[in-house]
Each structure stands twice: as C-alpha cells, then as structure tokens.
Image: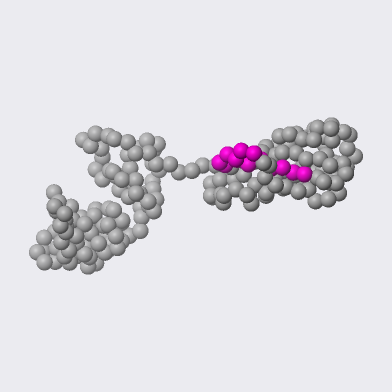
Amino acid sequence: MTTTAAVAATTVADPQDLAQLESLARSTAARLLPPLTDHQRLQVVPMSARLKFPRCANPVSAAAAPGLRVTGRILIELRCDASPPWHLYVPVRVVGTSPVVRVEQQDTNQLPPGYLDDASIAVGLTAARGIAGGAVLTNQMLLGSKVVQRGQTVTLIAGSGGFSVRMAGRALSDGLINQRVRVENLSSGKVVEGIARSEQVVEIIFQ
C-alpha cells in the first residue's frame, strides 16, 4: 500500500475514517472483478492506524490503478481532489475455496466394486456420508435424483459391436442416476442387471 507520504505524516485534527476507505476499496473491487462464488470473499489489505488523511471535502473517488492485472487481485486507487489532495493504493484480493477433481490410474484388481472411472458421473450428485481424503469414489458413496422406481416401465438399451437394441422392461428396484438396478425384460421374462442412465432408461450390463 502506498500513500501520499507528506499528507499521511502530518498531524490531522479531523482524519478520514480508514474503515470507510477500506469499505470503498472493497465495493469498488467487487464491481470490477468477476462475480464471486458462495465460497469466496474479498480481502482488503488492512490500513495502518498510523495513517492519517485529512477528511476529504469532496467524495473520495475510487478506480482500478493502472498497471498489470493478476487474476483474483486488483489494486484500487483512492483519491481526494480537495485541498490538500491525497491518494493511496489499496490491494484487494479474492480468497476462498474451490472444488477440485483428481483422476489417477490404479490397478483395477485393487479397486472397490462400483468405482467411478469418469469424473462426469459424479456431477450433480451429493455424498451419502463423509468421504475420507484420497478415497476412491464409488456409486454407493453418492446420492442423486431417483430416475427409476420399482415397478416402473423402463426402456432397456443393450449394445454390442457398435449396434444397440431397445426393448421394454420393468424395474425391480429403485435406482439413482448411474447406479445399478435389477430389471425384467418384458419380452423374454429374463431378469438382468443394468445401470440407470437417465429418466426411465436403463443400460444393460453384459456379464
């Protein structure tokens, strides 16, 4: 943070409220930076209580300082154009957390049943319970919207060698998106297992 040193070092009878200046810098940064997520906030570098600026007779102006822009950071220039004039630069940055996804190769013989091999499968789902860091995600750990209900008529899709066949079936258990369900082929009466891919659609699993 830089200031108009001569003004800041002078004894001031009626100083500018530093908290108001910090608030002005924060609101200006919020207007100039991209919208924040629910897990982010703006952090203003605190001003030293030793800084004393005469209360500005005019409204203090605020704008982005010229120079290099860095993602998630901005330098706000606050300026008083009254007499005596002064200005200072206030750094503001975005702080918070963001979800991340890590995909790595592991021995399939060591993986638990129902493991997820594609991060997109987990999109829109929530954890059914606490998950330890570094754990392999399985469909049993996640909850989503129920897309198949027991007794419901569904469309069965079976594919092999680039061809796919559709047939009518009946769900024998409830199923969430991308979870296994038991279904009956209404044409053959055979009970098979499939994966609920979307509403009323089950993809048959070939053993």
Answer whether residue 75 is magenta in the image: yes
Query: Looking at the rendering, which quadrant does residue 43 occupy?
Result: top right
184 or 34: nearer the viewer: 34
| Quarter containing the N terminus | top right
Residue at the outermost front position: 67
Q: Is residue 157 magenta?
A: no
Q: Position of residue 62 (x, y in %)?
A: 72, 47
> Which residue occupies the foreground of this view, 6 or 134?
6
In the visual, does 52 lie left or right of 125? right
Residue shown at the point (84%, 35%) measured from the top left? 7
Q: Residue at x 27, y 59 (%)?
A: 174
- Splitting the image into 4 quarters, where does residue 102 fall? top left
Write down the quadrant of residue 74 in the picture: top right
Chain part drawn in magenta:
67-79
User: Which residue occupies the extreme left position in the image?
Assistant: 188
Whether residue 184 appears in this view of the structure is: no
Q: Is residue 168 left or right of residue 22?
A: left
**In the foreground, 91 or 170:** 91
Residue at (82% x, 43% y) in the render: 16
